[in-house]
Amino acid sequence: MQLQSHRYFIINKPYKMVSQFVSSHPVRLLGELAFDFPEGTHAIGRLDNDSEGLLLLTTNKKVTRLLFQGDMPHERTYLVRAKGEMSEQALRRLQEGVPIRITGEEEYITTPCRVAIVDPPTGLYKRNNELPDQAPHTWLTITLTEGKFHQVRKMMLAVKHRCQRLIRISIEDLLLGDLQPGEVKELPEAEFFSLLKIAYRS
């Protein structure tokens, strides 16, 4: 009897949807997307309810360990709308590392990362309930190799800028691209692992 091979998906997780198929709370779930996911599908590296963008799904339970719990760090890039106009000093602080709270009183200094101010996005990243463009704000890309709890949002608060939107646009070479909110794309196993720069041995 031949074992069924694992399956691999990427989605553009919509705003106000959790990265779960089951919840005891009245929230929008991944199962509401217009796609028939196979039994055992789960999310890898969750995005919170208010965050958007690239989310990985698979039936392979080993991927989380290979991607986020291994010795080799993997880059994740986020498109961020920050409240207010960001100064060069605040930008440098983000790049060099800022103190954030992990749990309780425990403080952590974030690892140096790539942060750049970018032009406002168009098209795919526009939302019907978009924040007013005339309100002072700054769009950034932030590339991390770590993922502490709500790290990007906490980093923004550390430099006195509230995170108004948070969109994950890539993990390593796996890009969100032009995938629309709520859209699902299935990838072959070899391509999935290659783009994420992880090696898999059954």
Image (spheres, rainbow, N blue to C red):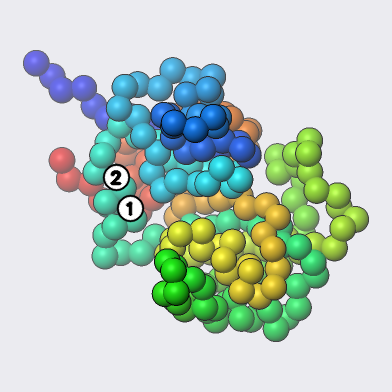
Residue type (three-letter) at the residue carrying disc 1 = Leu
On the image, which quarter does residue 17 sit in?
Answer: top right
Relative side of 51 to 123, left or right = left
Helix, strand, or loop for circle 2? helix
Q: Are marks 1 and 2 in contact (CB under 8 Å)?
A: yes
Residue type (three-letter) at the residue carrying disc 2 = Val
Q: Residue at x 62, y 52 (%)?
A: 166
Where in the figure is residue 188, as x and y percent of width and height?
A: 36, 32
- Quarter of the image that includes the N terminus: top left
Where in the figure is residue 144, as x and y percent of width and height?
A: 49, 65
Disc number placed over residue 63 in the picture, else none: 2
The residue labelled by disc 1 is: 67
Q: Residue at x 17, y 45 (%)?
A: 201
Where in the figure is residue 193, as x and y percent of width and height?
A: 33, 45
Where in the figure is residue 130, as x and y percent of width and height?
A: 79, 43
Using the image, determine if residue 118 lies above or below residue 108. Answer: above
Q: Residues within 10 Å of mark 2 (few under 14, many from 20)?
A: many
